[in-house]
Image: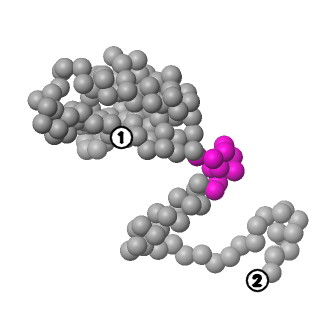
Amino acid sequence: MGIAADNLTTGAPERCSVSIQREADVAATREAVVRGLSAHNEARVGPRRTEPLALSLRDEAGTMVGGLIGELKWEWLYVDLLWIDEAHRGAGHGEALLGMAEQAARDYGARGVYLGTMSIQAPGFYPRMGYRECGRMEDYPVAGQTFHHFTKAL
């Protein structure tokens, strides 16, 4: 396929035929999208430099009764999941898990932490821990609920 005459003067990329389709192989599609997006991002802000973070809270028997899952990437910690079993809430375990995650982030060289929580979870917990709400999405995950976004500088 040749370059159209108008593309020669504008420098616009050559147009080609494309199609959009729903993929059955989600894993392969995800891998291709992540690879392409990662290359794009790396060219603009440098290597992702990622490291998973997993912390657990265990009772005397060794049973997991809480935990935190996150990812250290670029200059931030993203907290994906934080859970404390109801029988163990209110005893400072959430603060301890989040504090340990923040220390891991500092050790990693992170500048801050970001996370999200639903209104049915713990949006009041994070401001007490020094987090600032930086956004919210109304009617998510269902009508009448809110998804809160938080950040904290380290």
Question: Which residues fall within the magenta stretch?
Answer: 39-48
The magenta stretch spans residue 44? yes
Q: Residues within 10 Å of mark 1 (few under 14, many from 20)?
A: few
Q: Amino acid at mark 2?
A: Met
Q: Of residues 145 and 24, which is closer to you in this image?
A: 24
Q: Secondary structure at mark 1?
A: strand
Residue 81 appears in the figure: yes
Residue of label 1: 54
- Residue 36, located in which quarter of the rendered image? bottom right
Residue of label 2: 1
Q: Of residues 139 and 37, which is closer to you in this image?
A: 37
Q: For marks 1 and 2, give the CA distance.
A: 51 Å
Q: Is residue 6 above or below residue 136?
A: below
How many dots with numbers?
2
- Residue 25, located in which quarter of the rendered image? bottom left
> Which is in the foreground here, disc 1 or disc 2?
1
Q: Of residues 7 and 21, which is closer to you in this image?
A: 21
* x and y percentages locating residue 31 in the rendered image: 49, 64
Say which residue appears at 24% left-offset and 24% top-offset: 93
Residue 147 appears in the figure: no
Q: Amino acid at mark 1?
A: Ala
Q: Residues within 10 Å of mark 2 (few under 14, many from 20)?
A: few
Mark 1 or mark 2, earlier in chain: 2
- Numbered label attached to residue 41: none
126 sits left or right of 22 in the view: left
